[in-house]
Image (spheres, helix red, strand yellow):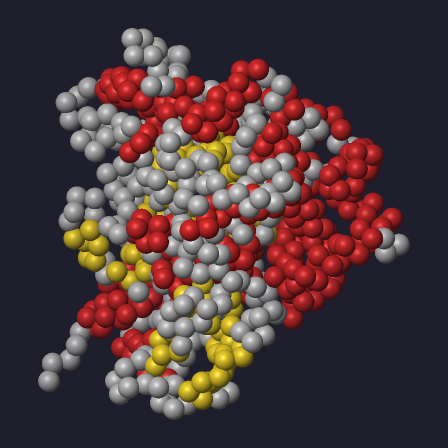
């Protein structure tokens, strides 16, 4: 008898666990993942395989989870469709009860033909219901067939309008919105960092001019004790908010904020930071927290002690947020305490062992001994939630159909509070990234972690649902960064080259159903960032579930490979835009600034013909400019007999009009393009070489909306969008799902 080699067993185990043991590279060559990489990644999923005994034990544990002999704690289904249960877990004739979220009860008995799955009758009510079989209770997450869409948002706005007594069923017009980097917004008195009050201000002013959405850079919680870590896409937690965007005057008034500034002796530094063109993150964050701490001391002395209505509101917020918020606040205080020690380390996996467990007696003792400090971080989250919630409320009150669109990062920093608080739900010791491709031959490791699909199954997707609810909480929509991550992610063991990774598959259908369910419960749209190489059929799956993709001007080449698509050929189910935070602005692209930057920081590759890479790239860009200008002319947004403008005179208005004419349900225009700015917010692949996430809008928001050029540009966009020829289908074409 031939004994199977350990290599074969590891490969089999990895495949069963969801890893793709081979993959196609950018040259369409099949690459096989090394056994050593698979072994490390399996161990990171809690499936050690260092020897034959461990392999057998891990294989048995995995088989027990996947065999169907026991039902998982949560199963997803779709409204109106039968629910299949594995026959191994069900006896034919067994009684079951379904307790609907609305309070209704459905009783029945399983009928399971031999060798077939047991079927539950379709449930016509969306929600989180409970299936009871004997003593076992299983959550049934029954989702609508699709997410809440822009058309639904328009219908809600129309139905809520006081003058809609006639029941007008006019289809929604093509809508538009602005995309803003929150940190870069400028407001008098903001202390050098854009805040939630500036967000509310731009929402109201843009709504007055016809905008229906305001897409915002991520507002996830960062590291209060490490202000040098400020990339919004590398957060400490995706459950909580960035407290550096708090406006100290928003809740307690200008007088209290001024008193806090004086108490912190921060007035001069506050004004100085406010005037800078680039954010000085460490200094600005430290100063903002110093002022907020002074405000907190005032609050404790004058309000908590007197049990004022505001103090009661704060305590109610903490009670509703529960242990998850308490854990985050404890982490913030713990990390600061660890970093204050000589040789202290900010990464929780390097803390004393007892402090790595949020449920340990030592962490409990720390929280008790440092209650005032922990409460400070609860206080900050309360203020942040009030600020962001207010911005969404005033956006709706001003007439926006959607309002804020929150950006959901693809992962969180492995050193942060999310990974510490949910350590059993997260992949530890790995980094999310990307394999080598034509643009980055070394591959990428982003230093982020995310959920373990194995833990998702065994824990009933609770951590994923918590994250979705946090993203939807203060928004009319979410943008899911790198939505391909719902299908699979490239994982790299920490400390390894990004080449030494593997794809891990995720339960796509379950995740899409949960997103649809939470989308309707929050009445919020969903946009998926689906740029780059996308597997066949993936965009169609998103469309079926009501998730809009994203289409960017620079990537919308004509079908014949020459020039650019006319607006009418753009995807009708995607959100159109001129650019993104990672790509050049219209003015920057036209000038070739992105090429200059890449050459400056060493991102250009030597050419085989010996030509200067930057010079050759600029020549190609000149050809692209001519092609784009020709597309503008054919679309009627540029005069047919006028030559293309020179590189330093970008046709920003023509580009905006071109995208405004596309048929998607919504288009968004980055504030940088509405201001005709040259520089982009972020240059991928750079760290200190480019001022990523530091650029500020040149004028305060209140002055911005008094600028004739800017306001004329918004007016032109609104007119062009109203003239777009492809209205959305009536939202009444599909009935609203019945959701609690």
Tell me if residue 510 comes above or below residue 345 in the rendering.
below
View extreme (front): residue: 166
Residue 86: percent from left, percent from top: 34, 79
Q: Residue at x 17, y 21 (%)?
A: 610
Give whichever of 472, 32 is nearer the camera. Answer: 472
Give whichever of 48, 507 is nearer the camera. Answer: 507
Q: Is residue 80 visible?
A: yes
Residue 467: percent from left, percent from top: 52, 57
View extreme (left): residue: 1
- Which quadrant of the structure image shows residue 441? top left
Q: Quadrant of the C terminus?
A: bottom right
In the visual, does 250 lie left or right of 13?
right
Q: Residue at x 61, y 22 (%)?
A: 705
Residue 373: percent from left, percent from top: 73, 54
In the visual, does 298 lie left or right of 195?
right
Tell me if residue 48 comes above or below residue 446 in the rendering.
below
Q: Is residue 693 visible?
A: no
- Which quadrant of the structure image shows residue 582? top left
Residue 7: percent from left, percent from top: 20, 69
Give whichever of 354, 413 is nearer the camera. Answer: 413
Give whichever of 65, 397 is nearer the camera. Answer: 397
Q: How many marks?
A: 0
Q: Residue at x 32, y 39 (%)?
A: 571
Q: Quadrant of the N terminus?
A: bottom left
Q: Residue at x 64, y 46 (%)?
A: 389
């Amino acid at each position: 008898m031939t004994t199977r080699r350990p290599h074969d067993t590891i490969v089999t185990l990895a495949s069963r666990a969801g890893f793709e043991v081979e993959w196609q590279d950018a040259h369409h060559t099949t690459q096989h993942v090394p056994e050593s990489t698979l072994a490390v990644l399996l161990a990171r999923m809690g499936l050690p395989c260092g020897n034959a005994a461990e392999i057998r034990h891990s294989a048995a544990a995995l088989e027990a989870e996947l065999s169907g002999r026991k039902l998982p704690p949560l199963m997803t289904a779709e409204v109106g469709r039968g629910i299949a249960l594995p026959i191994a877990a069900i006896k034919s004739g067994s009684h079951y009860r379904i307790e609907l979220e609305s309070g209704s009860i459905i009783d029945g008995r399983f009928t399971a033909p031999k060798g077939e799955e047991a079927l539950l009758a379709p449930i016509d009510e969306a929600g989180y219901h409970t299936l009871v079989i004997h003593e076992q209770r299983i959550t049934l997450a029954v989702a609508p067939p699709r997410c809440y869409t822009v058309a639904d948002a328009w219908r809600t706005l129309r139905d809520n309008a006081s003058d809609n007594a006639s029941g007008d069923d006019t289809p929604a017009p093509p809508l538009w919105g602005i995309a803003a980097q929150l940190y870069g917004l400028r407001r008098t008195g903001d202390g050098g960092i854009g805040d939630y009050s500036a967000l509310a201000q731009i929402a109201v002013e843009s709504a007055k001019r016809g905008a229906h959405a305001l897409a915002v850079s991520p507002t996830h919680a960062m590291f209060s004790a490490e202000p040098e870590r400020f990339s919004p896409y590398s957060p400490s937690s995706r459950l909580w908010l960035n407290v550096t965007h708090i406006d100290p005057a928003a809740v307690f008034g200008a007088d209290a904020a001024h008193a806090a500034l004086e108490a912190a002796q921060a007035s001069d530094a506050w004004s100085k930071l406010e005037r800078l063109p680039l954010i000085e993150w460490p200094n600005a964050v430290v100063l903002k927290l110093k002022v907020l701490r002074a405000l907190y001391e005032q609050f404790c002395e004058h309000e908590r002690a007197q049990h004022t209505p505001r103090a009661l509101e704060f305590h109610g917020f903490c009670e509703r947020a529960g242990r998850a918020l308490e854990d985050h606040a404890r982490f913030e205080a713990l990390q600061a305490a660890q970093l204050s020690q000589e040789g202290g380390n900010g990464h929780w996996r390097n803390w004393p062992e007892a402090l790595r467990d949020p449920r340990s007696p030592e962490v409990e003792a720390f929280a008790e001994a440092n209650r005032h400090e922990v409460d400070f971080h609860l206080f900050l989250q309360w203020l942040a939630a009030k600020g962001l919630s207010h911005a969404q409320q005033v956006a709706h009150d001003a007439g926006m159909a959607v309002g804020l669109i929150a950006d959901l990062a693809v992962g969180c920093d492995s050193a942060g509070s999310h990974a510490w608080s949910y350590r059993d739900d997260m992949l530890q010791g790995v980094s999310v990234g990307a394999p080598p491709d034509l643009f980055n031959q070394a591959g990428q490791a982003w230093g982020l972690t995310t959920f373990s699909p194995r833990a998702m199954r065994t824990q009933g997707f609770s951590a994923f649902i918590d994250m979705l609810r946090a993203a939807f909480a203060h928004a009319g929509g979410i943008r899911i960064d790198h939505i391909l991550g719902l299908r699979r992610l490239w994982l790299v063991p920490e400390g390894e080259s990004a080449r030494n990774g593997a794809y891990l598959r995720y339960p796509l259908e379950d995740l899409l159903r949960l997103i649809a369910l939470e989308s309707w419960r929050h009445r919020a749209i969903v946009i998926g960032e689906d740029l780059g190489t996308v597997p066949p059929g993936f965009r169609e799956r998103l469309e079926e579930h009501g998730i809009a993709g994203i289409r960017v001007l620079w990537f919308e080449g004509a079908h014949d490979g020459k020039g650019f698509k006319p607006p009418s050929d753009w995807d009708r189910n995607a959100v159109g835009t001129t650019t993104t935070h990672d790509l050049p602005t219209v003015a920057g692209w036209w000038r070739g600034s992105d090429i200059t930057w890449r050459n400056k920081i060493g991102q250009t590759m030597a050419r085989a013909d010996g030509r200067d890479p930057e010079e050759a790239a600029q020549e190609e860009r000149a050809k692209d400019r001519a092609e784009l200008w020709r597309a503008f002319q054919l679309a009627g947004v540029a005069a047919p007999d006028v030559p293309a403008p020179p590189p330093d005179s970008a046709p920003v208005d023509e580009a905006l009009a071109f995208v405004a004419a596309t048929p998607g349900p919504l288009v968004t225009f980055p504030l940088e393009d509405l201001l005709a700015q040259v520089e982009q917010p972020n240059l991928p692949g750079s760290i200190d070489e480019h001022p990523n996430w530091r650029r500020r809008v040149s004028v305060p928001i209140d002055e911005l909306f008094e600028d004739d050029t800017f306001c004329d540009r918004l007016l032109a966009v609104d007119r062009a969008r109203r003239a777009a020829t492809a209205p959305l289908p009536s939202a009444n074409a599909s009935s609203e799902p019945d959701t609690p």
